[in-house]
């Protein structure tokens, strides 16, 4: 399978614990995006990378959230001191960015987080 | 005002009929537009991308773009029960450095009834 993969697929944690999610993009893709999605809403942008550089981070994202893409391949998203409001589906998408505005994202299966 | 707006639905469509979904966006410089299908509990799956004004057809799906009106639509012909899902409209947003950020609508739920 050469699509975007995410691990774990499900995570249940207690409030106050730290969690880390991993995303492996499509191999030739240079851009990687993280989104959060709650019931009845579209994916909400969190951050994105081009190669290993983090180009933008949502202003809605608190300091408890951090993401890395150290070698320009896989990425991790860490949430520190989780809160019940962090419960959501965390989606990763990747794309191949070339010159011009045309860019198509492909999503991974997501990680569903439940904070008790 | 939300940057990408869709009717939430549900849009009820008889099997075999045409489903028509609409999306409006606020960023006049947006250049890339996408429709994704999302089944309950699953991640979004790309259906169509469109970059130029006019129609683009792919199988039973047709995307229509009107940049002057800031409007993009999706038609699903010969609707099947398997088309029952939420359809997300996505638009790229110009940031300070490049075309990097995608904005999603909240989605339109489509229910195809046998």
Image: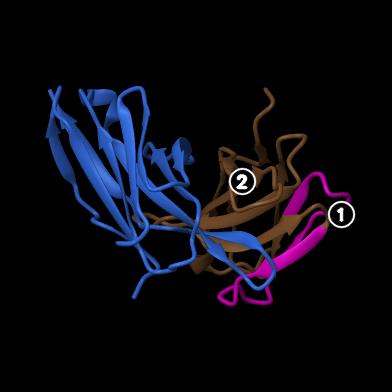
Chain shaded brown: A
Secondary structure at badge 1 equals: loop
Q: Position of residue A108 (x, y in %)?
A: 59, 39
Q: Position of residue A24 (x, y in %)?
A: 73, 40
Nearest to N terminus: mark 1 or mark 2? 1
**Lateral position of residue A41 relative to residue A37, left or right:** left
Closer-to-camera residue (B25/A66)? B25
Q: Which mark is residue B23?
A: none
Residue name at image x 56 percent, y 38 percent: A109
Parent chain of label 1: A
Q: In the image, which residues are magenta? A: A53-76
Mark 2, Cα crowd under 10 Å, few <14 / some 14-19 / many 20+, is many
Write down the residue under mark 1.
Answer: A70
Quadrant location of the C terminus of chain B?
A: top left
**Lateral position of residue B68 relative to residue A86, left or right:** left
Q: Is residue B30 visible?
A: yes
Q: Which mark is residue A93?
A: 2
């Amino acid at each position: 399978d050469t699509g975007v993969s995410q691990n774990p697929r499900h995570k249940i944690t207690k409030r106050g614990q730290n969690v880390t999610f991993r995303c492996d993009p499509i191999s030739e893709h240079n851009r990687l995006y993280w989104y959060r999605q709650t019931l009845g809403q579209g994916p909400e942008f969190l951050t994105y990378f081009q190669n290993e550089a983090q180009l933008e981070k949502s202003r809605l994202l608190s300091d408890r959230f951090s993401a890395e893409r150290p070698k320009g391949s896989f990425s991790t998203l860490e949430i520190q001191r989780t809160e019940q409001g962090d419960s959501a589906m965390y989606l990763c998408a990747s794309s191949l960015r070339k010159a011009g505005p045309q860019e198509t994202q492909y999503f991974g299966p997501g990680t569903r987080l439940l904070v008790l | 005002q939300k940057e990408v707006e869709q009717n939430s639905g549900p849009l009820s469509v008889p099997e075999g009929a045409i489903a028509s979904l609409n999306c409006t966006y606020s960023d006049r410089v947006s250049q890339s537009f996408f429709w994704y299908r999302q089944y309950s509990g699953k991640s979004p799956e790309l259906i169509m991308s469109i970059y130029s004004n006019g129609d683009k057809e792919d199988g039973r799906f047709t995307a229509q773009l009107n940049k002057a009106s800031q409007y993009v639509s999706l038609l699903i012909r010969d609707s099947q029960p398997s088309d029952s899902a939420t359809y997300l409209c996505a638009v790229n947003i110009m940031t300070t450095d490049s075309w990097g950020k995608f904005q999603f609508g909240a989605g339109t739920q489509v229910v195809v009834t046998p």
